[in-house]
Amino acid sequence: MRIDTPDDAIVEAAVQRAVETWGRAPTRLLQVLRETQEALGWLPPVALERVSALLEVPIARVRGVVAFYSFLYADPQGAYRVLFSDNVTDRMRGSEDRLRELGQRLWAEPGTVSEDGLVSLDRTSSVGLDDHAPAVLVNGRPVPDVDAARAALLGDLILGRVPLAKWPRELFAVEDRVRRPGPMLTDPMQPGDAIRAALGRGAAGGAGPQATLDEIKAARLLGRGGAGFTTGVKWESCSRQPVTPRVVVCNADEGEPGTFKDRLLLGRHADMVFEGMTVAAWGIGATQGFVYLRGEYRYLLDGLRETLERRRRAGLLGTAICGQAGFDFDVEIHVGAGSYVCGEASALVESLEGKRGIPRNRPPRLAEKGYLGRPTIVNNVESYCAAALILLHGAEWFRSRGTERSSGTKLLSVSGDCERPGIYEYPFGVTVREVLADCGARDSIAVQVGGPSGVCIGQDEFDRRIAFEDIETGGAFIVFDSSRDMFEVARHFAHFFAHESCGFCTPCRVGTSLLRNLMDKIRDGKGSQHDLLTIEELGGLLHNASHCGLGESAGRPLLGTLQRFRPAYERRLGSPAVEPAFDLDGALARARRMTGRDDPGAHLGEWS
């Protein structure tokens, strides 16, 4: 990692290596930029110009991509880039204190590079380590459970300019806290089992790939990312498109704050993930597959690639998979670069194509026209694992758990005010109260199910059930006890959505900023009942008028807490009348001090 601007020869070599690895197709732009930055530490102008020339992409597009992704840097970031995870769970565990302590030790302010160019400190959205909060990323590598002692050790290592390769290995160790395993986390499936079962089912029934689609439909598998679309219907729709080749995409961009189940599946059950993708490829007739891995999980990349290579050697990827003539399919991993909106399926496909992750207009659906215009299915990590289990054990086995509408089990990422944060696997239909008891939660007043884009559950709703017919969730389950201020929780989520908006549509770009500003105004004691009404109106407008799910969801945490914890808002209101958020006369106080004036004429309220 370099601190100063590298020589042109060094830049040229870094760009050439990245291009040799990924090729010159414009779709490889994001990956070429990411690998170039890994070599240089940032992306100097000459690097952008060389990438533009070699990939034959306009320089404006290159710069636009760099500006869009928060993990691509057009300015030097120092030899050590320290990012504190800034989810609400991290703050609950003291992340702001640790950030302040480390900043003082390193003489660096958050959002800046130290004067000697050694280190930069900043906050970033959740890094998928909510069960190890507070957590940080150092040059992309995770450091969990950063208490005061660990923060001090980080400071010593950085000030000592110790290379990361020589840091204590235990600093980077992330424990998989599986608290309640179920079928998905304990199944002894071996590589190839589900693929051979799918091929055998087709041979026995004479229906070929259609037998796989029929089994997924019979299992009533609903997407595990939160939206709950019927997986079998999606796959069958894609399979019937006349255009080939078709594409299978795994959405591993687990960016919803409070969710970390996919981290476990990718790290410990990667074979099951790839097995499900390969089964899907057989069902829809796909030849090309992608895993879109979130940038915060870059440290999982080497292990995933090793698993892919092992599967290729075993004949489970590549040509004639498991000896089946014409069954050709392989998987490539693309790494994201820090953008929450890329969790939305069409934005993810745009990013796969090397562009900014702007959600697409629909129709057409991705199953009709997805990656490079090809029929494409996008499912999340847990959905592919479920599909593999269905093909191995059958639809009836899968339906034997859960509810009538919500078949199977669900992985929950439990964090917050509880004794045992971690991963819990339950049959659909489990109550919120049961989960709270299992995780050792005490004196709970609220649970945020599904992360900021989900729903806030109050004490009187703890008997509600985790199921698509009641509380839908992608997996986040954040617990809050009576020591927490639910207004501050909602205000943090408002800042999150304003920061993560891609800015494409006006309702989201402007609406999220207005909600953030209104929450700050109320915090400062300048809010009124009119502001609460405005929050409700804006939340409805965002839901109805936004281009994608981010804007549609941005008002939910405010509306939910306002409904259930209204006193937390009202006790902060400064006046029953409308009051401006900006105090112009107060802003002139510094000028009065500088001029030595404090007479009535120096105050706006005294002007006639």
Image: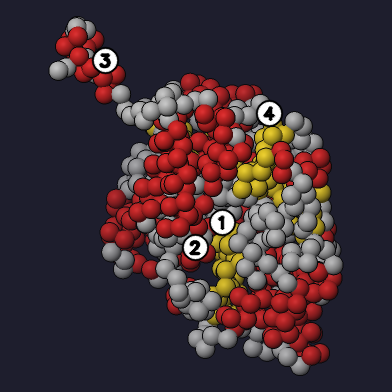
Residue 44: % across, % down: 33, 48
**Can residue 82 be seen from the camera position used here?**
no
**Pointer 2 residue:** 348
Do tag 3 and tag 1 residues touch (Cβ < 8 Å)?
A: no
Q: Is residue 25 left or right of residue 374?
A: left
User: How far apart are the alpha carbons under marks 4 and 1?
Assistant: 32 Å
Judged from the image, the secondary structure of the residue bearing numbered disc 2 is: helix
Do tag 3 and tag 2 residues touch (Cβ < 8 Å)?
A: no
Which amino acid, by three-letter code, is at mark 2?
Leu
Residue 425: % across, % down: 78, 53
Of the residues under marks 1 and 2, which one precedes in the sequence? 1
**Pointer 1 residue:** 253
Residue that protrudes farthest toward the bottom in the picture = 206
Residue that protrudes farthest toward the left in the picture = 608
Which amino acid, by three-letter code, is at mark 3?
Ala
Q: Reply above or below: 92 against 165.
A: above
Do tag 1 and tag 2 residues touch (Cβ < 8 Å)?
A: yes
Judged from the image, the secondary structure of the residue bearing numbered disc 4 is: loop
Of the residues under marks 3 and 2, which one precedes in the sequence? 2
Looking at the figure, which quarter contains the N terminus?
top left
**Pointer 4 residue:** 482
Q: Is residue 134 left or right of residue 33?
A: right
4 vs 2, front mark: 4
Of the residues under marks 4 and 2, which one precedes in the sequence? 2
Of the residues under marks 4 and 3, which one precedes in the sequence? 4
Residue at the image position 64 percent from the left and 88 percent from the top: 326
**Pointer 3 residue:** 589
Judged from the image, the secondary structure of the residue bearing numbered disc 3 is: helix
Q: Residues within 10 Å of mark 3 (few under 14, many from 20)?
A: some
Q: Residues within 10 Å of mark 4 (few under 14, many from 20)?
A: few
